[in-house]
Image (cartoon, helix red, strand yellow):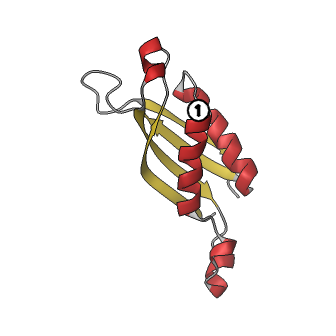
Amino acid sequence: MDKVFIQGLSIQTTSGFYPWEKEIKQTLVIDLTMGWNTKRAAENDELAKTLDYAQISEKVAEFANNNPVDLIETLAERLANYLMESYHIPWLKLKVGKPGAVHNAITVGVEIERGHQQ
């Protein structure tokens, strides 16, 4: 299976359990790998036949900001479902990191894998 990826996508959104976190925007860093057959796009150099990572990057930020959650686990699950349904992605791996959330750690977060690799 071919893969299209977005690595280190930094977004500002509301995410957190504590009341003070609901009042501010924090940085989340997204790594996304999506299973996709890139051969069809490559045959005639057609963007319409691949996953447009610029468009998907915008949609990820838009989704996170329009769907605030307490847990990044919830965001990861909902975002994975949204992307798979919207773009007909058969498989993806999604990592959501929250830099600075834990003292002395560069980042903390979750990584999920959904669908089936072909």
Give the quarter of the image for residue 42. Answer: bottom right
The quarter in which the N terminus is drawn is: bottom right
At 48% across and 20% down in the image, what residue appears? 22
Measured as percent of width and height from the top left, residue 65 is found at 55, 37
The quarter in which the C terminus is drawn is: bottom right
Give the quarter of the image for residue 81. Answer: top right
Circle 1 packing at 10 Å, graded few (<14), some (14-19), many (20+), is: some
As displayed, is residue 52 above or below residue 78?
below
Judge left or right: residue 12 versus residue 1.
Answer: left
Measured as percent of width and height from the top left, residue 18 is found at 46, 13
Judge left or right: residue 106 versus residue 91.
Answer: left
Say if residue 112 shows up in the picture: no
At 59% across and 65% down in the image, what residue appears? 52
Judge left or right: residue 41 versus residue 103.
Answer: right
As displayed, is residue 94 above or below residue 36?
above
Q: Secondary structure at mark 1?
A: helix
Say which of 64 and 106 sits in front: 64
Give the quarter of the image for residue 40. Answer: bottom right
Measured as percent of width and height from the top left, residue 3 is found at 57, 62
Which residue is the extreme one toward the left? 104
At label 1, the amino acid type is: Leu
At 59% across and 51% down in the image, what residue appears? 59
Say if residue 42 shows up in the picture: yes
Which residue is the extreme one toward the front? 23
As displayed, is residue 95 above or below residue 109?
below
At 35% across and 33% down in the image, what residue appears? 99
In the rendered image, which residue does mark 1 sit on?
75
Measured as percent of width and height from the top left, residue 100 is found at 31, 28
As displayed, is residue 36 above or below residue 97?
below
**Numbered circles on residues, count:** 1
Which residue is the extreme one toward the top? 19
